[in-house]
Image (cartoon, helix red, strand yellow):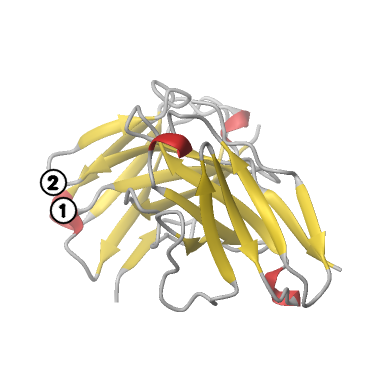
Amino acid sequence: EMQLVQSGAEVKKPGESLKISCKGSGYNFTSYWIGWVRQMPGKGLEWMGIIYPDDSHTRYSPSFQGQVTISADKSISTAYLQWSSLKASDTAMYYCARHSLSGYAYWGQGTLVIVSS
Amino acid sequence: QSALTQPASVSGSPGQSITISCTGTSSDIGGYDYVSWYQQHPGKGPKLMIYDVSYRPSGVSNRFSGSKSGNTASLTISGLQAEDEADYYCSSYTNNRGVVFGGGTKLTVL
């Protein structure tokens, strides 16, 4: 069974760094792009970017370029989303999903990130 | 890349049909047949309901259908049921090789 399992909720302070993860199983992790999607409280879905785990090639939404870093470790079938200096406005639910031009059929359960002083 | 435009809310009575529109540009919806629709219930993750404009994934009710004309895609739900009450999002591939979502539509079943 194909699964994406994300790391648990995080509570951080402004200025702190953070790296959340998304582990794939049940399929060839290196053969599919992984995408990240943000959902701020009470708001809609926002596409952040994607990574191809086999060679770590990335593509970012202009809105998120330079704000976050997407990476992957194919040896452990895991993709990451990281921040070097969190802001209160980064408070949101973050989803990973198996990227496809046709649509996102497989999603992680989401990681809630709360940034508060 | 600006978000695709969806109505903030739609409503319908059980058994009725509703249609949610999703308007983009020739750089996204109008340029590719890669439009998808997602259903999201409160506190839950998104679920793919339609892909490639009009195809349903296995397990999705045939009450859900999708179409596209020019720069506008549509999701139609027929025979509305209480369980259909949720937020719905459209999405499209874009010409900068990314993805863009719509702002979301809240469906209320009266």
Q: Which residue is disc 2 drawn over? A: A54
Q: Residue at x 73, y 77 (%)?
A: B81
Left or right position of B98 against A37: left
Query: Disc 2 marks which amino acid?
Result: Asp
Label 1 vs label 2: CA separation? Answer: 5 Å
Q: Within 10 angstroms of label 1, few (less than 14), some, or many (20 or more) residues?
A: some
Q: Quadrant of the N terminus of chain A?
A: bottom left
Asked if marks 1 and 2 touch (Cβ < 8 Å), the reply is yes
Q: Residue at x 16, y 50 (%)?
A: A74
Mark 2 secondary-structure assignment: loop
Q: Is residue A27 visible?
A: yes
Q: Chain of mark 1?
A: A
Query: Disc 1 marks which amino acid?
Result: Thr
Left or right position of B64 against B81: left
Left or right position of A75 against B88: left
Rendered location of residue A33, percent (x, y): 26, 48
Q: Which residue is disc 1 drawn over? A: A30
